[in-house]
Amino acid sequence: MTSALLTIQNLTVRFGGLVALDDVSLDIAPRSIQAVIGPNGAGKSTLINVATGIYGATSGRVDYDGARIDGRAPHAISRLGIARTFQNTELFGEMSALENVMIGADRHMCGSYLSSAMHGPAYWRTEQAIRAEARRLLELVGLGNDTDVEAAALPFGKQRRLEIARALATRPRLLLLDEPAAGLRSAEIDELNSILLDLRANLGLTILVIDHVMALVMAISDHITVLNFGRKIAEGSPQEVRSSPEVIKAYLGEKAAHASHS
Amino acid sequence: MTVRLLFGAVVLVIFFAAPHFLAEFQLFQVCLIAATALVVLGIVVVTGIAGQISLAQAAFVGLGGYGPAILAARYGVPVWAGIMITAVVVGAVGYALGQLTLRVSGHYLALATMAFTAIVQLAFIHSDAVTGGAVGMQMPTLEISGKTFASGGTLYYVVLPVVGVLFLAVHNLIHSPVGRAFAAIRQSETAAAAMGIDVLAHKSAAFAASGFLGAIGGGLLGLLSTYLDPSQFGITQAVYYLAVAVVGGMQSPLGAIVGSAVFVLVPEFLQAFQTYLGLVFALLLLVFIVLRPNGLVSLASDLLRIVGGKQQRGAA
Ligand SMILES: Nc1ncnc2c1ncn2[C@@H]1O[C@H](COP(=O)(O)OP(=O)(O)O)[C@@H](O)[C@H]1O
Ligand SMILES: [Mg+2]
């Protein structure tokens, strides 16, 4: 067995009396595309928020590439190579699409404060490199014609793709996408699927996709984990998960579960 | 590149020509505008760009004046060296103040920085032995290699270059990864952190910059007024600097210059209304917050867009 890139062990997260995640364990193999699905409030976003340092774990732990990361600062986790998108998009709204992506790339190329204050030749070289990188990533997600548009002015579907480009600019190994398909039309979902498959093939990325319906993830996931009320109720290949009575029950209610048995 | 060189040449010509056309008092006012603009530039960085409301600027200005005055009076440090040493120390104080943002933000940050200004002012007033207490103290005259700079006409050649260089440096920083990180933090701290930006370190750096700029500005203002009066470094003055930034435009260094020009020159035109000056400024502040939150600078860019739009239509 190859060792996992991200390991979540017995993770429990409580908000006061509310148990958002209850003893959840999960392994993400390198270069895999995995999905976490579940109804609203199942704890999916909480899972990503713990893995990216926004929330702490009440108990249990998260390890990335052999080191424990839960409880570390979000920027430190980003620098380890974990990038994410947000369920309700968190773009830098007043900046252009290009600038949004440049911010992700800055850390890899920026020079010293002194060269930034002087704007010497070295500064212009790196600035050009950052710009070129950002433009390339925007083209990759199909936003090549929107580079100068203010992020807040983009339609929702494009904002989601901009978030993916911005996340990629940090040069991650692991990409966590929180409901990237929500609000997209089915043609857009197909586009997104092919982008994700390309990313794995070309950059060797490992990808965790969250969704509350199965539409997106069925087609591209190697492995699916199903959460309901903070607990893991099923996991396996898309086929296994689709036929699991627990899952049908969670999604369609008791009646459908009985119907599928009879 | 040629555009930059041309712009630089024009600026130099104006700089050397101005003293031949302006009276001594007018040169003094130009210096006053420049020094005030430098103070307000600190607010542009920390509040306008990085989004951290600060009412600490008056304290930074006060420290920037008292520092070199005390260093000169007690230890015989030349004033120019005193101003530089003090600015570095006040920058460090700003950095420490920025660490507060780990615990407080928004309105509470405004209150915390206001408390800082109040405390520093109290320290000026109650350290009689060092600062002269409520009476204040004399700002020593600037001397550089035997030459004294005491009038508007002579200080002009010191104040303008210093302010010019610092404005250029800040302008460059704003248009670099550092400035982009500040702006990112203003727009979404969560996303900025997810991009690998150390939010706390950058907020502290922004406060450090505002402290440094405020202190240099304070030193220059001290040289111009020749006297340090502790009543000039209180909360009212902190609000005044914030108002200058709001009226000029928070988001760009140019706004600091425009705002400072308005606030230095308007009182000249309104001599008759001296008693109501506070009221005039308060109204100005209100009007701008409600109608033009991006300040006078945005008025200029809107006008340019309208004119540009007309031209395009004319061409079509
Ligand atoms: N910061 C928070 N404070 C309190 N409760 C929270 C917080 N974040 C999430 N929750 C709660 O935890 C549960 C799981 O939320 P979430 O992870 O967002 O679910 P999902 O993403 O699967 O829809 C929900 O009941 C939600 O209200
Ligand atoms: Mg969610």
Image (cartoon, rainbow, N blue to C red):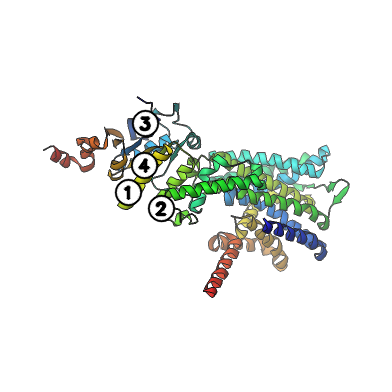
Mark 2, residue position:
A158
Camera-side mark, 4 or 3: 4
Mark nearer the N terminus (2 vs 4) = 2
Mark 1, residue position:
A190
Quadrant where the C terminus of chain A is found in the figure: top left
Callout 3 secondary element: loop
- Whether tag 1 and tag 4 are in contact, CB under 8 A, the answer is no
Mark nearer the N terminus (3 vs 2) = 3
- Gap in angstroms between the C-alphas marked 3 and 2: 29 Å
- Whether tag 1 and tag 2 are in contact, CB under 8 A, the answer is no
Mark 3, residue position:
A29
- Gap in angstroms between the C-alphas marked 1 and 2: 14 Å
Foreground: A111 or B228?
A111
Residue B257 showing in the rendered view: yes
**Are the residues under marks 4 and 3 on the same chain?**
yes
The amino acid pointed to by label 2 is: Lys
Q: Which numbered marker is on residue A197? A: 4
- Whether tag 3 and tag 2 are in contact, CB under 8 A, the answer is no
Mark nearer the N terminus (1 vs 2) = 2
